Each structure stands twice: as structure tokens, then as C-alpha cells.
């Protein structure tokens, strides 16, 4: 290896490659492509200036290039470059213009800071002091008359439930888990109301702002948002929004962030009482809580959400079932009804209520629904519960 020396041309090429590797790996996480191009152009110009400064080095640098262009024995190499350089340029251009299926990199806040005030419903709301007027009315009534207060609470939750399932469940899901029918088409995806690290950390005023103004109401300084949230104050009344907020917290057994400690204590007490009532909920009460919104009060498939679903929810009153293991026109077995409730029906709005990892109903609760479903039958197809096996 004595006397081995790297010529100027190869020195320049090695320096350019090393510069590229440094730029590509030394600036985590990723150096933008446009910045990489600028850095490499500056680097190559610097390398050329360095070798052009000395005539001897410049001649040495040009020698391989001139040899390739002029020497007769380098014809194959010239043809290689004549074909490869246009192909390389074409490949680079194609890579730059072809459509990408990857979502663009966006820096966005999880929870944007709300504005100081909000103007909707021909009113101006101060978000720093705004409280849920429906909840306040419930708490005032509860302090005077417990039964009347709980009655108002149930009315508000029921009204919010109907509004939610008529307008919101397509995106946020029938289980309020952010996995509605359209959710997979959105980026960012709809919020998961079941997540205990999200909703309980927010004030109701924040949710009122987000619901009423939707994606277009997000702050300019936080763009790009790409939020698909509609501007609901153009479609829902003010009380509808507050009722939906009450329903979301009630359904998931959560409490909003409330600064007044006495109010927070009262609302938390109401939540604890609601959860205690639902702890061992079974049968008809369970059906009313989880199933009635779709399948209807009398199981006729005419719940408030039914008109917005395709296929429509099953009509239990006719005792006609599609998914069963029993032959022909025979009624489904109890195991068939159990499996349908537990596993759900992909391609429909029927969720899997007992799916492992996010089960909302226990096996015992699911079994308690089977007599309720049979009880809706008006064709007398099912034998009475106390009938013997032959009947």
C-alpha cells in the first residue's frame, strides 16, 4: 500500500457522501427533504471551490471526467452514464410527484387552548366563567327536592342520549369509544369519551366550545387541524348541547373538571350513586340502559337511533332472527343470542358488548338480557319461561 493516494475526484466524491450521511443521521428525528437539498448544494459548491482554488488539484479533479468523455476505451462507460443519468432524473421526478397514502406530519396540540369568549346562539359566553346551566338547574332542584332533582337529571341524560345517537355516534361510536362507522376515515380520529385520561380532565365549558364551533372554530395558531367536527350550533339548540355533555359523562361514569369544590363534591356524589345502581344492573334495567336506544322500548327495532342505521336494529317482537345455529325456521338457541350480544355483528351497528379487552357487559349480564328479548315476542313463538322442556 506504499505510495497509495486517493485522487482529487474521489476525495470530492467521498466528502460529498460523508456530508450526506452526516446530514441524514446527525439531526434527529428527520431532516426535511428541502433542507437536505439546500445543505447538499452548499456542500457540493464548497467542495468544488476547494479543488478549483489550486490549478494542480483542479486538473487532477477533472482528469477522470475528461477521460470518460474522450477516451475511446471508455465508450461503454459513456453509454452507461448516458442511460443512467436520465433514468435517475426520471426516478427522482416520479418520486416527487407521485401521490402518497401516508398522512402528512403535523405538529398539533392534543387539547387546544380555548378562546377567552365564545359567540354562538346570538350570545357571547365567557368561557372562563361558563358553567353548565342544565347541570346547575339539576343541582338547585336536588338541594330542594331530591326526587325532583334526580328526575330532572334522568330527563337531561335521556334527552342527551337521543341527540347523541341521532347525530354523534357515526363518528364517536355507539359505545362512545371513538370507533364509529366513519372513524377510520378521519385523521385525527374522533375523541374516545371512555378514556379516563381525557374527558374528566376537561371543563364542560371547553366541551361546549368544541361541540358548538367544531373544527372551523379551532384557533388559527394551532393549524393545521384537519378536524372533521361539524359546527353543531348551526344544527342543535343550546340545551341540546348541554344535555349531550351530561349524557357523555353519565354514560361513562365520569365527572367533568369543576373548580368549585362543593359543586364538584355533589356531582361526584351523584356519579357514585349512579355507578352503585348500575354495578349489578340486570335484565330489563340493563336493556333500558344499553339496548333501548337502538332496539326500542318494546323491542320493535324502533329506537331513536334506528332510522339512522342500515341495516336497522333487529325487531324482537316478531321472533325472527338471522344469525343462529338452529336449523330452518326454528327459533335461535340461547347460545346464539348470547354470542350475538357478546361478539356483535361486524358490518352492522351491533357492537360486541363482551369483547375481551373492552367488555362493557359480563357474561351474567348478557344472559339476563335473553329473557327480556324473548319477552318482546308478540307472536307467541317462545314458550313461557316456566314451561317444561317439551313445551
Image (cartoon, rainbow, N blue to C red):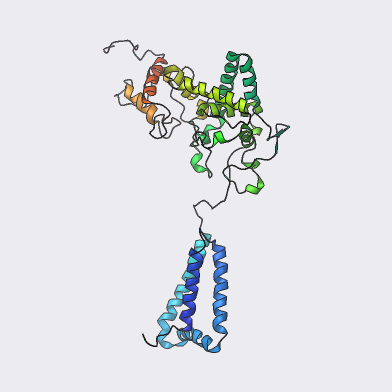
Q: Is residue 306 above or below residue 225?
A: above
Q: Is residue 376 above or below residue 19?
A: above
Q: Name the spot of residue 280 as percent of width and height, x first.
A: 42, 20
Figure quadrant of residue 247: top right
Q: Name the spot of residue 273 as percent of width and height, x first.
A: 51, 21
Please give left or right for residue 37 compared with residue 119 in the image: left
Quarter containing the N terminus: bottom left
Q: Is residue 75 above or below residue 212?
A: below
Q: Name the spot of residue 342 as percent of width and height, x first.
A: 38, 28
Using the image as rendered, state which of residue 94 and residue 259 is in the foreground: 259
Q: Is residue 117 above or below residue 76?
A: above
Which residue shows up at 49% across the image and 68% down it? 22
Please give left or right for residue 156 compared with residue 294 in the image: right
The residue at the far bottom in this view is: 56
Quarter containing the C terminus: top left
Q: Is residue 311 visible?
A: yes
Which residue shows up at 38% across the image and 19% down it? 368
Q: Name the spot of residue 192 as percent of width and height, x first.
A: 51, 36
Amino acid at each position: 500500500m506504499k505510495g497509495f493516494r486517493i485522487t482529487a475526484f474521489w476525495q470530492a466524491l467521498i466528502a460529498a457522501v460523508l456530508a450526506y450521511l452526516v446530514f441524514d443521521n446527525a439531526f434527529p428525528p428527520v431532516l426535511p427533504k428541502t433542507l437536505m437539498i439546500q445543505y447538499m448544494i452548499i456542500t457540493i459548491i464548497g467542495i468544488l471551490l476547494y479543488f478549483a482554488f489550486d490549478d494542480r488539484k483542479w486538473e487532477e479533479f477533472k482528469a477522470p471526467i475528461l477521460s470518460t468523455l474522450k477516451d475511446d476505451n471508455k465508450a461503454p462507460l459513456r453509454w452507461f452514464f448516458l442511460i443512467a443519468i436520465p433514468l435517475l432524473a426520471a426516478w427522482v421526478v416520479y418520486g416527487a410527484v407521485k401521490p402518497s397514502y401516508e398522512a402528512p406530519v403535523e405538529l398539533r396540540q392534543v387539547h387546544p387552548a380555548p378562546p377567552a369568549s365564545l359567540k354562538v346562539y346570538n350570545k357571547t359566553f365567557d368561557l372562563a366563567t361558563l358553567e353548565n346551566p342544565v347541570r346547575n338547574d339539576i343541582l338547585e332542584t336536588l338541594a330542594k327536592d331530591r326526587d325532583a332533582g334526580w328526575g330532572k337529571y334522568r330527563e337531561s341524560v335521556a334527552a342527551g342520549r337521543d341527540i347523541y345517537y341521532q347525530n354523534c355516534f357515526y363518528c364517536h361510536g355507539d359505545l362512545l369509544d371513538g370507533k364509529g362507522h366513519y372513524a377510520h376515515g378521519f385523521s385525527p380520529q374522533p375523541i374516545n369519551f371512555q378514556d379516563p385520561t381525557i374527558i374528566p380532565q376537561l371543563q364542560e365549558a371547553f366541551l361546549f366550545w368544541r361541540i358548538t364551533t367544531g373544527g372551523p372554530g379551532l384557533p388559527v395558531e394551532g393549524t393545521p387541524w384537519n378536524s372533521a367536527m361539524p359546527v353543531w350550533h348551526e344544527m342543535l339548540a343550546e340545551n341540546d348541547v348541554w344535555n349531550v355533555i351530561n349524557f357523555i359523562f353519565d354514560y361513562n361514569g365520569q365527572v367533568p373538571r369543576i373548580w368549585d369544590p362543593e359543586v364538584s363534591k355533589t356531582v361526584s356524589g351523584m356519579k357514585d350513586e349512579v355507578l352503585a345502581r348500575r354495578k349489578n344492573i340486570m335484565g330489563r334495567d340493563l336493556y333500558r340502559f344499553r339496548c333501548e336506544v337502538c332496539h326500542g322500548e318494546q323491542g320493535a327495532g324502533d329506537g331513536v337511533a334506528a332510522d339512522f342505521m342500515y341495516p336497522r336494529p333487529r325487531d324482537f317482537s316478531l321472533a325472527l332472527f338471522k344469525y343462529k345455529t338452529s336449523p330452518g325456521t326454528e327459533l335461535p338457541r340461547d347460545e346464539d343470542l348470547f354470542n350475538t350480544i357478546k361478539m356483535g355483528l361486524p358490518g352492522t351497528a351491533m357492537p360486541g358488548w363482551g369483547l375481551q379487552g373492552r367488555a362493557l357487559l359480563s357474561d351474567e349480564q348478557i344472559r339476563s338480557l335473553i329473557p327480556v328479548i324473548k319477552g318482546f315476542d308478540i307472536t307467541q313463538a317462545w314458550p313461557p319461561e316456566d314451561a317444561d322442556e317439551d313445551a
